[in-house]
């Protein structure tokens, strides 16, 4: 099990993802400016190449690392005898729970190189947030999720997000609330098991 | 009654399709479907599936979050005696329910099951 405190964001990784492509674009521009002042193919390659590569990296890079790390984590959990009773793949976090052993496994999008396998006893609070707002027929939500506090760090996992407001009795919202309630119950059960 | 009866028989679970009359409710029971969880609902038309997987419960509160429930009603036609079992799988979410559409068994597939 991991004794380190939970860190949702690895600042170095975050900066590398954002800053390195910017530096590459700047370097390309500098080379183009110094050596291909008259234009031509060299200038096009120096200015356009790094820009296109950087945009491709921003679109595909972090997502492919994230997907690969998720798969890797699941394989490792299975090989370590972690019985995944419930696994929830959120957009920025993956949460797996072994109820019987009272363990929680976490992986974060902005910290994909660090897998956390922790005792569920370190969770201090769990709850569902349905995001309900508005009154009367305008009552609705655009975000539903489950949250928990582990080592004092708040982890929010969305089960539904939208740029529109949806009615609270909409099937999509009901399903999202149900998923969140189920995960809260599973986390509570694991927490209980870790104490027994 | 003729046309209305035909329409009701076609769209209402509790109308006998042969006699075009309203059937009486013989038995009503709530079940849990433990192997069907939120986000993984698959409709089954096979009566044996429900025989194997339905677990009788007293009230909705006995069903844990994320697990599907299934309401079962057995009807009997007062004229021809035909029995029909209607299953209504749904996801209970706090005070609300997300229904997946009812499934009718009109050939006695679940007649004895509800009486066990």
Image: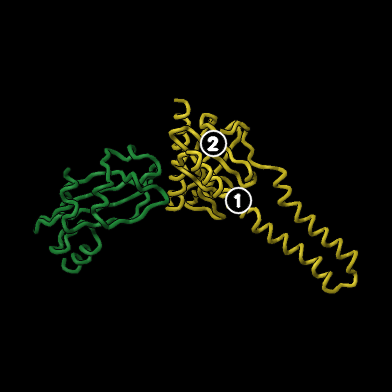
Chain colours: A yellow, B green
Along the line of sight, the residue nearer the viewer: A56 or A126: A56
Residue at 32% over, 37% down:
B62
Residue under label 2:
A148
Q: Nearer the viewer, mark 2 or mark 1?
A: 1
Q: In which quadrant is the N terminus of chain A drawn?
A: top right
* Residue reaching furthest to the front: A79
Above or below, A156 against A152 in this view is: below
Along the line of sight, the residue nearer the viewer: A102 or A89: A102
Residue at 76% over, 51% down:
A19
Question: Mark 2: few, some, or many residues within 10 Å (few <14, many ≥20)?
Answer: many
Residue at 68% over, 57% down:
A58
Q: Quadrant of residue A116?
A: top right
Q: Position of residue B41 (x, y in %)?
A: 37, 53
On screen, residue A144 versus residue B86, left or right, reads: right
Q: Earlier in the sequence, mark 2 or mark 1?
A: 1
Q: Which mark is residue A53?
A: none
Q: Chain of mark 1?
A: A
Q: Tell me if I can see residue B34 in this picture.
A: yes
Residue under label 1:
A66
Q: Position of residue A177 (x, y in %)?
A: 46, 45
Q: In which quadrant is the C terminus of chain A drawn?
A: top left
Disc 1 element: helix
Disc 2 element: strand
Same chain shared by disc 2 and disc 1: yes
Question: Mark 1: few, some, or many residues within 10 Å (few <14, many ≥20)?
Answer: many
Q: Chain of mark 2?
A: A
Q: Position of residue A57 (x, y in %)?
A: 69, 58
């Amino acid at each position: 099990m991991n004794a380190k405190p939970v860190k949702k964001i690895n600042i170095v990784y975050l900066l590398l993802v954002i800053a390195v492509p910017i530096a590459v674009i700047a370097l390309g521009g500098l080379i183009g400016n110094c050596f291909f002042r008259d234009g031509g193919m060299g200038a096009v390659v120096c200015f356009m190449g790094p820009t296109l590569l950087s945009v491709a990296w921003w679109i595909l890079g972090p997502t492919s690392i994230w997907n690969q790390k998720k798969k890797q984590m699941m394989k490792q959990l299975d090989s370590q005898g972690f019985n995944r009773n419930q696994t929830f793949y959120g957009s920025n976090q993956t949460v797996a729970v072994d109820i019987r052993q009272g363990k929680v496994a976490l992986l974060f999008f902005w910290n994909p190189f660090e897998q956390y396998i922790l005792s569920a006893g370190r969770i201090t609070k769990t709850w569902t947030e349905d995001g309900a707002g508005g009154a009367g027929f305008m009552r609705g939500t655009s975000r539903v999720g489950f949250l928990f506090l582990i080592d004092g760090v708040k982890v929010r996992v969305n089960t539904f997000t939208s740029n529109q407001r949806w009615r609270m009795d909409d099937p999509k919202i009901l399903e999202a609330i149900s998923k969140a309630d189920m995960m809260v119950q599973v986390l509570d059960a694991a927490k209980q098991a870790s104490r027994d | 009654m003729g046309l209305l009866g035909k329409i009701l028989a076609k769209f209402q679970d509790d109308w006998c399709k042969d006699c075009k009359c309203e059937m009486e409710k013989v038995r009503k029971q709530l079940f849990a479907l433990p192997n069907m969880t939120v986000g993984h609902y698959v409709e089954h038309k096979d009566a044996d599936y429900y025989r194997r997987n339905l677990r009788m419960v007293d009230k909705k509160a006995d069903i844990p979050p994320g697990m599907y429930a299934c309401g079962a009603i057995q009807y009997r036609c007062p004229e021809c005696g035909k029995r029909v079992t209607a299953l209504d799988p749904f996801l209970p979410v706090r005070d609300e329910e997300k229904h997946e559409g009812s499934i009718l068994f009109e050939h006695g597939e679940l007649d004895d099951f509800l009486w066990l």
